[in-house]
Amino acid sequence: MTLLITVFAAVISTVIWYNRENDDMKLGPLLFMYWGASIMWFVDAIFEYAELGAEYFAPALEDIINDTFLGLSVVALGLVIWVVRLLILDPKGKIGRILIRDRKTV
Amino acid sequence: MACFLVSGAEAVVVKAVEKAEEKKELKRIESGDVSVNSATIPLSRKLKWLFNLLLGGAVLLAFEHVWHGEVVAWFPFLTAMSDPADASEMFHEMATVGVTMALLITAVWAGMCVTADAIVKRNASDTASNEA
């Protein structure tokens, strides 16, 4: 489930990246992060399948819920890393302008 | 257990190579080397893709290990290190799962580079034929 959620996040972020009009949102690292994690979890799944066999495709409900929660948390963490990086890089210069304006008013 | 460390270590090496390559490319541009043309993707840029893939994956996988209680905030940071049997299992996992992860990411990146070069060449030849 974690693999599936991360793959969906990777595909969606790639489609958004492809349709972007400029690089202001700095989406590149976000999709690389999701694709990297997807590949790594894919390898993990192959090894788990080799160990468990067909049982791998019939997880317990509790495991599905836990993995879904983990997958969503991973996607959220990726988004947080991306948005923090975006604010630090400040490609549109908005944060810089706000900080200068605030300094003038204080 | 700690499979993400292999990709993390590779990411560090790739970053070092990328920085060295970036310096070389800058020197070549400054010296006016004609072999540097705009129709190819610089190696430093390609290495940046690999670095992002490796580090991004390693960070998200590290979070998964924290989630499962395999990585902790105190020394030795990996719970498996406190028991020799667990530690040997962890090293085995790093050597199998971890190395396979790093290899697959590198293979995917190599495929990406070949495809990207082909796309750039196709676009360059399309532009040239349109201009002719």
Image (spheres, grey):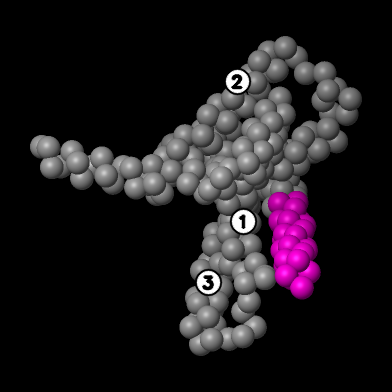
Residue at x 38% of width, y 42% of height? A87
Is B44 left, or right, of B127 in this rendering?
left
| Residue B22: assigned label | 3
Residue at x 71% of width, y 25% of height? A1
Residue B109 occupies quadrant: bottom right
Mark sitting earlier along the chain (1/3): 3
Query: Mark 1 sits on what residue?
Result: B49
Q: Main secondary structure of the magenta part?
A: helix
Q: Check if mark 1 and mark 3 are on a common chain.
A: yes
Question: Residue B33, position in %: x, y?
Answer: 58, 86
Work out which quarter of the rendered image holds the N terminus of chain B and state it. top right
- Contact? badges 3 and 2 (CB < 8 Å): no
Q: Nearer the viewer, residue A28 or B9?
A: A28
Residue at x 61% of width, y 79% of height? B36
Amino acid beneath label 1: Trp
The span from disc 1 to disc 3 (Cα, nearest Å) is: 14 Å
Q: Secondary structure at mark 3?
A: helix
Residue at x 67% of width, y 71% of height? B39
Q: Secondary structure at mark 1?
A: helix
Amino acid beneath label 2: Phe
Work out which quarter of the rendered image holds the C terminus of chain B and state it. bottom right
| Residue A69: assigned label | 2
Q: Is residue A41 visible?
A: yes
Q: Report the chain holding disc 3.
A: B
Residue A4 occupies quadrant: top right
Question: Residue B126, position in %: x, y?
Answer: 77, 64
Question: Residue B70, position in %: x, y?
Answer: 57, 34
Start and end of the magenta stretch? B104-132
Amino acid beneath label 3: Glu
Magenta-span inclusion, residue B65: no
Foreground: disc 1 or disc 2: 1
Q: Report the chain holding disc 1.
A: B
